[in-house]
Amino acid sequence: MRIVVLVSGTGSNLQAVIDAVADGSLPLEIAAVGADRPDTFGVERSAAAGLDTFVVNFKDYATRTDWDAALLDAVAAYKPDYVISSGFMRIVAPSFINAFAGRYVNTHPALLPSFPGAHGVRDAMAYGVKVTGCTVHFADAGVDTGPIIAQTPVTVRPDDTEDTLHERIKVAERELLIQVLADLARG
């Protein structure tokens, strides 16, 4: 199984995948890592691991349509079985979703369908939930919608801040992503 991983930030989920592939516990090939800006630690992690890396910098395109087309072309060039959105903070175009329908996997730091969007952890805390967590799902044209593959609950502690809760969710998210990818690789 070949994957392309898309990142926008630190790439902590990416590092977990790199490590699991390296130690043999995850039977897949990371064909490439893509980012939407060049200054991400995820790009550095990818380069340090010797992986093909590409950047489709949003700022380099005159229109959103041009960027969408460039991202689709860059990812499709690697002929991935799955595309993994791992902290990729851009909504992709319907053409991208259609090209990778049922093969575009997204991670989210909340138990969807609750608290979709960029501030899932903050929104869960503001609502006062006692349990939140993480979700891995097949992305569709909506924001954090699409069929749920798996979820892991994380208890909200009385002394949690947004940062402490988010760090615990990230740990659960990495474990869940590895489990989901292993299941997909096994068919």
Image: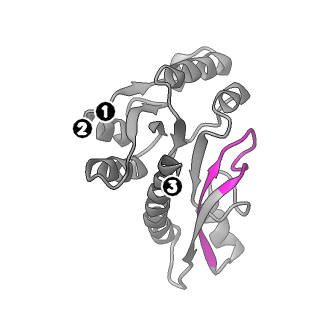
Question: Residue 93 in the image: x percent, y percent?
Answer: 69, 29
Q: CA distance from mark 3 to mark 2?
A: 27 Å
Question: Residue 157 in the image: x percent, y percent?
Answer: 53, 83
Please report the residue visible at 52 percent of the width from the left and 56 percent of the height from the top: 180
Residue 140 lies in the magenta-colored region? yes
Q: Nearer the viewer, mark 3 or mark 1?
A: 3
Height in image: 93 above or below 41? above
What amino acid is found at the position of numbered circle 1 in the picture?
A: Leu
Q: Nearer the viewer, mark 3 or mark 2?
A: 3
Label 3: few (<14), some or many (≥20) within 10 Å?
A: few
The quarter of the image holding the N terminus is top left
Residue 89 lies in the magenta-colored region? no
Q: How many numbered markers are drawn?
A: 3
Please report the residue visible at 69 percent of the width from the left and 61 percent of the height from the top: 112
Q: Residue furthest front?
A: 187
- Please give left or right for residue 20 compared with residue 8 in the image: left
Lower sequence index among marks 3 and 2: 2
Lower sequence index among marks 3 and 1: 1
Question: Residue 122 in the image: x percent, y percent?
Answer: 61, 64
Q: Which residue is mark 1?
A: 51
Height in image: 120 above or below 139? below
Q: Which residue is mark 2?
A: 48
Asked whether 174 or 58 is in front, the reply is 174
Q: Which residue is mark 3?
A: 183
Label 1: few (<14), some or many (≥20) within 10 Å?
A: some
The residue tagged with tag 1: helix, strand or loop? Answer: loop
The magenta-colored residue range is 131-148
Q: CA distance from mark 3 to mark 1?
A: 23 Å
Label 2: few (<14), some or many (≥20) within 10 Å?
A: few
